[in-house]
Amino acid sequence: MFDTLLIANRGEIACRVIRSAKARGLRCVAVYSDADRDALHVRLADAAVRIGGAAPADSYLRGDRIIDAALETGAGAIHPGYGFLSENPDFVEAVEQAGLVFVGPSAQAIRAMGLKDRAKALMEKAGVPAVPGYHGSDQSDARLRDEAARVGYPVMLKAVAGGGGKGMRIVAEAAGLDEALASARAEAGAAFGNTDMLIEKYIETPRHIEVQVFGDGERAVHLFERDCSLQRRHQKVIEEAPAPGMTDAVRTAMGAAAVRAAEAIGYKGAGTVEFIVDGAGGLRPDGFWFMEMNTRLQVEHPVTELVTGVDLVDWQLRVAAGEPLPAAQEDLALSGHAFEARLYAEDVPAGFLPATGRLAHLDFPDGVRADSGVAAGDEITPYYDPMIAKLVVHGADRESALAALLRGLSRTQVAGTVTNLAFLKALALHAGFAAGEVDTGLIARDIDALTEAPAPGPQVIAQAVVTLAEPGQGFTLWAPLHRRIETSAGPCTLIMEGPDRARVIVADQQVRAIRQGDSWRFDGQAAWPAVRHGNAVTVFAEVTHEITLVDLLERAAYAGALGDTIEAPMPGLLREMAVAEGQQVAEGDRLAVLEAMKMEHVLRAPRDGCIARIGVQAGAQVAAGTPLIELEKAET
C-alpha cells in the first residue's frame, strides 16, 4: 500500500481527492502552476511542487514533470482527477514505467474507449445498444455528406476524441453541414489534436442518462444512474440521481448494459457509461443507446455518493492498492434523491461568457455540500475552467431535494465576479424541471426566460448607495449632504439628513433609510446581506446585484472609444480572423473566433458595413477589451 499520493490536477477535484486521501491516512502532494501558487489545493496538501507556467500546456499537461514531482516527493501513486491527463493512456504507461501506481483504469482500457468510433464498435460487439450513425475511417467531406444523408437529418457531429461538448454540432439540414463540420473540426483539433468526426442520428427529445460503474479489472458493479439532461451547449448544468421517471425494468437493463461495457474492457476503478435516451413517451428498456464511456471520475460523481453512501474516491484508492471490489451488486441500494448544480463565474446575460475576478466574498450555507477549489480572496483566472463550486444537496425524495437545492442557491453568496447563480435558481424554479420533465433541449427552448436579468429595485440601489457613502468615499455622514451619484444601475440622488437618516431618489421613486444600531432599514424593511468591495457593493437580494460607483470620466472615454470597434469580450487566443480589411460584411457574419476557457466563441458583425482595420492577427493572445476589428463609421 502506498503511503503518499500525488494529485495531478487542480481546483475542486484536487481538493476533493485530498480530503478522501487524508481520511485514509495518506500523505498528499499537490502540483501547481504559476497561476495556482496560492491556490486552495496547494494550501490543503502536505507538500506542493511547482510544475510550470500558467497555461495548461506548460504545467498540468506536462506528464513528465508531474512524474518527476512524484518521484522527488516520495509519492507511490498518482491520482489524475478528471480532465488534463486523466484519460491519456500514454501518461498511464509512463506512470507505471516509473514504478508508480496510477489510480484509474489501464492504458488499454482508456484506449479502447478513448475514440468514440472504436468504442461504439466494441460496444456493439459486447451487446450494448448503440445509436445509429457512422464511425468509419473515411473522413472526406463527401463521405460524411453521404453518411449524414443515409442516417437522416437532424444529425449530431461529434469529435471522436475528447469530450466536454467540444467538437460537437447539431445539424438540422444538409445545407448547414459544411459550416458545422469546419467549425467542429477546428474546435476538436485545438482541444484534442484530432479532427476526426463521427455522425449520429440526433434524437429530437433526448435525455442524457449515465450509469456509474466501478470495476477491479475483472468484474464490475454499477452504482445506478444519474440524469444529466439539463445542458447548455452540451455542457452539463444540473445533474441528479436517480433519474426522474426511471422504472425498475429500465434501471436493470441500463445497469446490466453498463456492467457489460465495463467488463468487456477489463475496467478498473470508477467510470461512467453514458446513454442517450429517447424521452418521448417515457423511459423504455429498448429506448436507450450507448454514447460513450468516460474512463475517469466524473464531475457529477457527488450525487451518486449522496444516494448510495459510497465514497468513490476512497474506493478508487482501495482498488488501486490491490484490494478487490469493496461491494457486490446486491450490497448497493439507492437512498433518497440528490442534485448537483455547477456554479460558474460567467456572465449569463452576455451569452454565458466566462468571467474572471478576485472573490471578495464567498459563503456557502449549511445543508449544502460545496465542492470547491477556491475561497474568499482567491482569483478566478482566464487560464482554467471558471468553476467556483459544485453545490450538492440530498433529500428523502425528489421534491424535498429540489427544495433543498433552491434554498442552497438562494443562500449562496459570491462577490467579486459575476456568476450563473440567478440562472441556476431560475432552472430550479422551472415548472417543467420541477415536474421531472427534463430533456437536453429544455434550456434552449426557454433560454430567454431563464437568462432574463432583472434590474435591481430602488431599495437595492438605495442600500448600495448608502453603503458606498460610508467614510472613505468622500462623504460626510454627520452633516447634511445632497449629491447626485452615477452608479452602474443608473443615476440617483443621495440626501443625507443626519448621521442616521437618508433619502435616496432613484428615477422617480424615493427610498427612506434609517439606521438602527449597526444596520439600516430601507422603507421599513431590513437591509439585505451585502458586502462592500472597493467602489462596489454586492447586495444578496432575491437575485444578487453588484452596484458600482461609476467614474464619469472613464465612462465618457469608454463610450468615445467604443464606436464601431469589435473588442475581445474576454482574455483568450484569437484562433481565427475570418475577414480582411476592405471586406464588406452583413449583420451576423462571422468575423473572428476567440478560444477562451476551453471553449470557442464566434464574434459576429453587429451591423452591415466595411472592415476598416484589423487590429490583431490570428494566433495572438489577447486581453479582455482588446480592439480586434474596426468597422467604417456608419453614414448618418
Image (cartoon, rainbow, N blue to C red):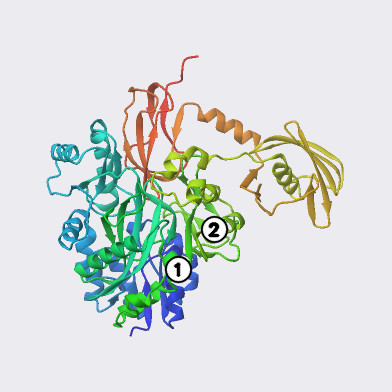
Q: Could you say where residue 548 lies in the image, as x and y percent from the top left?
A: 64, 43
Q: For residue 181, what is the image quadrant?
A: top left
Q: For residue 582, what is the image quadrant?
A: top left
Look at 50% across and 43% down and name the residue there: 348
The numbered dot on residue 510 is: none
Q: Could you say where residue 542 lies in the image, as x and y percent from the top left?
A: 64, 48
Q: Is residue 269 visible?
A: yes
Considering the image in quadrants, where does the N terminus appear? bottom left
The numbered dot on residue 307 is: 1
Single out the residue that lies furthest toward the top: 636
Q: For residue 233, what is the image quadrant?
A: top left
User: Image height check: is 482 above or below 309?
Assistant: above
Q: Is residue 265 visible?
A: no
Relative to residue 375, is residue 187 drawn left or right?
left
Q: What crowding class fits label 1: few (fewer than 14 Cα within 10 Å), some (14-19), or many (20 or more)? A: many
- Of labels 2 and 1, earlier in sequence is 1
Q: Could you say where residue 226 lies in the image, as x and y percent from the top left?
A: 39, 60
Instruction: Provide the secondary structure element on which disc 2 rests.
Output: helix
Q: State the residue in front, 140 or 221.
A: 221
Instruction: Provide the secondary structure element on which disc 1 rests.
Output: helix
User: Image height check: is 50 above or below 601?
Assistant: below
Relative to residue 543, is residue 567 drawn left or right?
left
Q: State the residue in front, 206 or 7.
A: 206
Q: What crowding class fits label 2: few (fewer than 14 Cα within 10 Å), some (14-19), or many (20 or more)? A: many
Look at 45% across and 29% down and name the residue there: 565
Type of amino acid at the residue the image marks with label 2: Leu
Q: State the residue in front, 332 or 231.
A: 332
Q: Could you say where residue 189 lies in the image, as x and y percent from the top left?
A: 25, 48
Tell me whether the residue at label 2 lies in contact with that at label 1, contact meaning CB atoms closer than 8 angstroms: no
Identify the residue under disc 2.
405
Type of amino acid at the residue the image marks with label 1: Val
